[in-house]
Image (cartoon, helix red, strand yellow):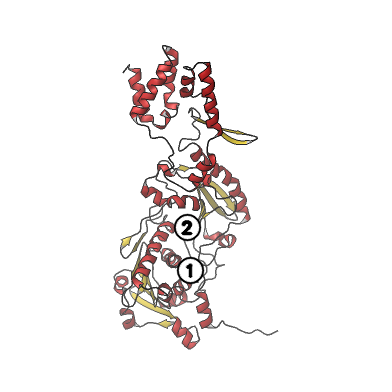
Amino acid sequence: MRELEHAPHAPALTESMRSVGYSLESAIADLIDNSISAGAKNIRVRFSPYGEPFVAIIDDGCGMNDKELVLAMRHGSQNPKETRSANDLGRFGLGMKTASLSQCRQLTVVSLKRGQLSAARWDLDVVARTEKWTLLLLDRPEIAALPLVEILSSQDSGTMILWSRLDRLIAGENSVESSLGEGMVRVREHLALVFHRFLFEEGHFDHLNISINENPITALDPFLISHKATQRLPEERIRIEDSTVLVQPYILPHYSKLAPNELKLAGGEEGLRRQQGFYVYRNRRLIIWGTWFRLARQEELSKLARVRVDMTNALDHLWVLDIKKSVAYPPQEVRQNLKRIVERIAEGSRRVYTFRGRRSNDDRSVHIWDRIEDRNGICYRINRDHPIVTSIEGRLDDEDLGLWRSVLKQLDEMLPVEVVYADMGADRRHVRQRPDYTLEDLTDLADKLLDACGMNRTLRSNLLSGLNNIEPFSLYPDMTEAIIARLQNGR
């Protein structure tokens, strides 16, 4: 048996690797991974559609010298089986080159370390002409002529990645300006989500600044952690090999409780449904989101459930991570534990809808509608013991009482459940989640309930003491307290 070194044909392979599947936003995110791994605290994304259009990513990380830069420009610069540092966001040693060349034909990397600038370039036209892996090393005048290099030179250290000849970005577009501008809007939204845990201080980690054309990016928190109605369920830990996977479930507030800007952060009305599920983070960097990994179905009533799953890069080989770091699938041991957690989490989301934002453990509330579950399924019935119902029945004679109860039965049986479900499934905001009572409405209703009690002091006292727990008063605690105070004082 003979051994033959059989290197790939450089032009063919470089052109083929451009079709790995990077989008503009995923390509830039991949480059920012490298900046974070290099210890950068400030990352600037700059672009210009004018003249010779370009895109640049400039960081203030540790930088590279000549030797380190040449190694970094090599395809497969690090074996994915090698142990990486705990905070390293890289994986295959292909990201910078593959991501960049998926968008442009010329990739230039300039790095500053210990006061020395180094620069190297991959030019696909040169590779095609020489039919070799021809890397270009730039000299001082060539470096000085590059756009934005003065920003890098003003720092103590850092790296600039420059994309030129943006053939993929502007192919088939009538306007480079509008095409690149619209693309950067998507980039901003993508980076705000993918790096949201870096964009504000978390634990002992420093705050990271990312900007696009000097406009800072604000974190987009998919869990709305700062919202007072967000439910944070108990964290669970899954031990696998020598690492720990952290699972932190959240139940988002119902969208009727969200202001327009908060609803936008949650992904919008449509995003609430589509983006339910697991959010997998690798070293705090979001890599995949909005999926249940086929452990559960995407349902309308579970769409408020989102689960943060934290893993380290030590488990990459088990999660089947792809080059773009946009696809991952949990190993069997993790799936088994997640499946056990899923139903409990989804049930919490359903309760937010069932109780329309009230606490699911508030058993003291007297609801107008009862949810009844038996062997035949689930149905909804008007609560015959509700004070409004009993007060009306107390004023009816036998003939009218029969008619009244017949009306209640018809309301029970003819409740348009399918229509309500379809409307809520379409996220129609005009489907009101609670009545719009005014103080005058509630006061009038309370007076009528008291009148129905007659002169029976015990009934009147019991009604007032429990008014806060009776719908619709329980939906308006502040107004109800004022009404109770007025009635107790005889006003």
- Given the current orientation, which residue lies at the most extreme bottom position? 130
Q: Name the image quarter holding the C terminus.
A: top left
Residue 389: image location, x then y, percent? 48, 23
Mark 1 Cα shell of 10 Å, populated few (<14), some (14-19), many (≥20): many
Looking at numbered disc 2 in the image, what kind of residue is underneath it? Answer: Leu
Judge by depth and name the residue closer to the eye, 359 or 217: 359
Instruction: Note whether 275 is above or below 31 in the view shown.
Output: above
Mark 2 Cα shell of 10 Å, populated few (<14), some (14-19), many (≥20): many
Whether residue 370 is visible here, answered yes or no, is no
**Dot 2 lies on which element?**
strand
Judge by depth and name the residue closer to the eye, 142 or 114: 142
Tags 1 and 2 in contact by the CB under 8 Å rule? no
Instruction: Note whether 289 is above or below 431 in the view shown.
Output: below
Tell me the quarter of the picture where residue 62 sits. Answer: bottom left
Looking at numbered disc 1 in the image, what kind of residue is underneath it? Answer: Tyr
**Dot 1 lies on which element?**
loop
Q: Which mark is residue 286?
A: 2
Instruction: Note whether 467 is above or below 133 in the view shown.
Output: above
Tell me the quarter of the picture where residue 449 sits. Answer: top left
Q: Which residue is mark 1?
A: 22
Residue 60: image location, x then y, percent? 35, 66
Q: Is residue 46 left or right of residue 406?
A: left
Q: Name the image quarter holding the N terminus.
A: bottom right
Q: Which mark is residue 140?
A: none
Judge by depth and name the residue closer to the eye, 368 or 3: 368
Foreground tag (1 vs 2): 1
| Residue at left offset 52%, top offset 69% | 92
Residue 66: image location, x then y, percent? 41, 78
Q: Is residue 36 left or right of residue 413?
A: left
